[in-house]
Image: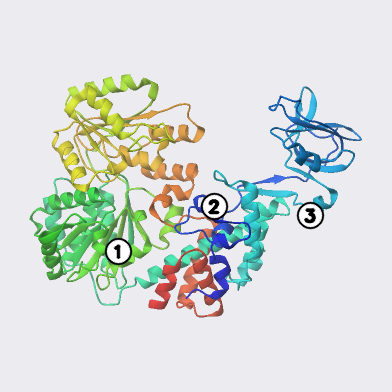
Amino acid sequence: MRPTRLDPLFAPIGTLKGVGPKLEALFARLLDTDGPPRVADLLFHLPSGLIDRRARPTLAEAQAGQIVTVEVSIDRHRPAPPGKSRAPYRVQCSDHTGDLTLVWFHAHRARIEELCPVGETRIVSGTIELFDGMRQMVHPDRVVTAEQFATMPLIEPVYPMTEGLGSALIRRAGDAALARLPKLPEWQDRHLIDRRAWPDFGTALRSVHAPRDLDDFAPEGPAWSRLAYDELLANQLALGLVRANLRRPAGRRNVGDGTVRARIEAGLPFELTGSQRRAAAEIASDMSAETRMLRLLQGDVGSGKTVVALMACAAAAEVGRQSALMAPTEILARQHAKTLTALTGQSGLEIAILTGREKGQERARILARLESGEIAIVVGTHALFQDSVRFRDLGLAVIDEQHRFGVHQRLALAAKGEAVDLLVMTATPIPRTLVLTYFGDMDSSQLTEKPAGRKPVDTRIIALDRLAEVVDGIGRALDAGRQVYWVCPLVAESEETDMAAAEERFATLGQRFGDKVDLIHGQMKGADKDAAMLRFQRGDSRLLVATTVIEVGVDVPQASVMVIDHAERFGLAQLHQLRGRIGRGETASTCILLYKGPLGEVARKRLDIMRETEDGFRIAEEDLKLRGEGDVLGTKQSGMPGFRLARLEHHGGLLETARNDAKLVIETDPKLTTERGEALRDLLYLFGRDEAIRLVKAG
């Protein structure tokens, strides 16, 4: 049970004064929460900038373009002339050094007369501009009396907004949320707090939302650093508790004498690379240890992760244990099953596939053979989590594209056996900082070489207004017997965007190339997707128009050209993943990045990096610099915990401290029962790491 002292922070935003159902719906969109937004979600929505109203010049000293706060006398009103409703309403005012005109468009006369009574003094804040050489202030931010000015904040936070929800509304709701903030026990180490001169949690939140000077808001300042560290510690503590919970009871080794692995390697149609051998050895070493394996296998697109995973499955099979390989999509699961079946050859390992599509008698037969132990390796989607799926003795769980699955799913699969080793694979190389952030202490193996025979891909950047030339070039490639991917970012044209939709592009290319063109997108039924993919793999279709469903794992060695439509709309990692679908065969390959200009600075950098390098690890580092950590791993799409308070570019240096602190806590207080341990439970609840608390209780 969550402690009752946290209840004010977990109350819906709709319980705050001034936030009705309409505003609550807008806040839900702004804060991007799974359920109704809570008070804590609003408090964790930090300002993106500040307005500093402390400059108090005379009118003669005020500079054009500067935000100033000036004291003026109201001299006269100049309303819009009759019949000229579009003309502005002007108010002339002055101080002892000069004149200023206040300007409002679409003004309510009575309202402005009340705001600026002639002959009285007012304090006015806004941006000074010059118009025909005269000073003016259009739509002043503030017009207040001396009494009102005494309570007005001079440094004002500015928040990320959404349509219908401006900064002032967010600020008001934020003030109401801060008023609800309870006094919470200190969960941080007292020595760390003193050494860093950090405020307590409540004071830190108030400082960032209502700063008194610029230091209160600086990301490296004490208040924001404290909040960032809270979030990093919650993350590292949750990862550490999961890892501690995954420790294997002593006495079960998941590695045999190497005979099955030797048989598989002897039958491979290629030589293993040095990094494949090294990764396989590291995994086998983990699987033979007394504690359970929790290892991350990173490999660039086409670096041969599946073979390394197969060697791990074979090691488990040598001692009679089963393996499960879980993929995020059905297309990828079927691709893995096909690859594994081809590679196992004469090894005698039985492989099966289990997705939502296997039904009736076929499904019952697979489930029975899994339970009896006949099947050594099962490949599937999240269908593998279902209660009906039982193993005789599951020893290894391999999870592909880890960032698409949450911690609880990882645990659900590992719970289907006793002392199950866990191997996590990703084709998105992850910068070192992010490995620490999202995987904690997980050991990591990297595949840094590409298998022999992989050719470099020639990447070109071409503007969309040269589309006709590109289509002509595709025609020549098709005439030469080559196969082509054409990737579009959306399935159907939407009102908000002018992106080329897959269906529309399919129709126009179909007019030119007829039945050589096929279509595949995420909204098609599984069987239809597979059929389209099969036609392309067999060469029945030559030009496949697709959305990003082909991003991961689809293997058609004959395809040697890829066009990415509106490439400026894709992230770097995604562009790199897509490009990895070509360059797998004997033919020299070309990737065309079609963009619609003019390009913004970030989009231009992204495309330039794609042209310069095929090194996935460098691309991942550049992606982190350009987009920040949340997007690199697709946290928005995947439900993976992105950070709300920590910014790795500012707070990455605190990660190591958080990891060491979490480690010490788990070693000395694994059940979180000490005074600090109880307070740390509050921290885990606050940052949505509840699964870690369930583990503490279950353990």
Q: Depth check: 615 or 368 in front?
A: 368
Instruction: Please tell me whether residue 644 is drawn above or below residue 257 in the rendered image.
Output: above
Residue at (24, 62) in percent of width and height: 384
Give the image quarter of residue 247: bottom left
The x, y position of residue 339, in whole percent, is: 17, 49
**The label number, if any, that marks residue 79 in the structure image:** none
Give the image quarter of residue 392: bottom left
Q: Earlier in the sequence, mark 3 or mark 2?
A: 2
Q: Earlier in the sequence, mark 1 or mark 3?
A: 3
The x, y position of residue 602, in whole percent, is: 49, 36
Q: Give the left or right position of residue 597, taking residue 579 as reference.
A: right
| Residue 699 in view in this figure | no
Q: Give the left or right position of residue 91, taking residue 587 as reference.
A: right
Find disc 3 in the rendering and name its residue.
Answer: 151
Residue at (47, 69) in percent of width and height: 663
Mark 2: secondary structure:
helix
Find disc 2 in the rendering and name its residue.
Answer: 22
**The label number, if any, that marks residue 422 in the structure image:** 1
Mark 1: secondary structure:
strand
Q: CA distance from mark 3 to mark 2?
A: 29 Å
Residue at (23, 36) in percent of width and height: 519
For badge 3, the amino acid type reads Thr
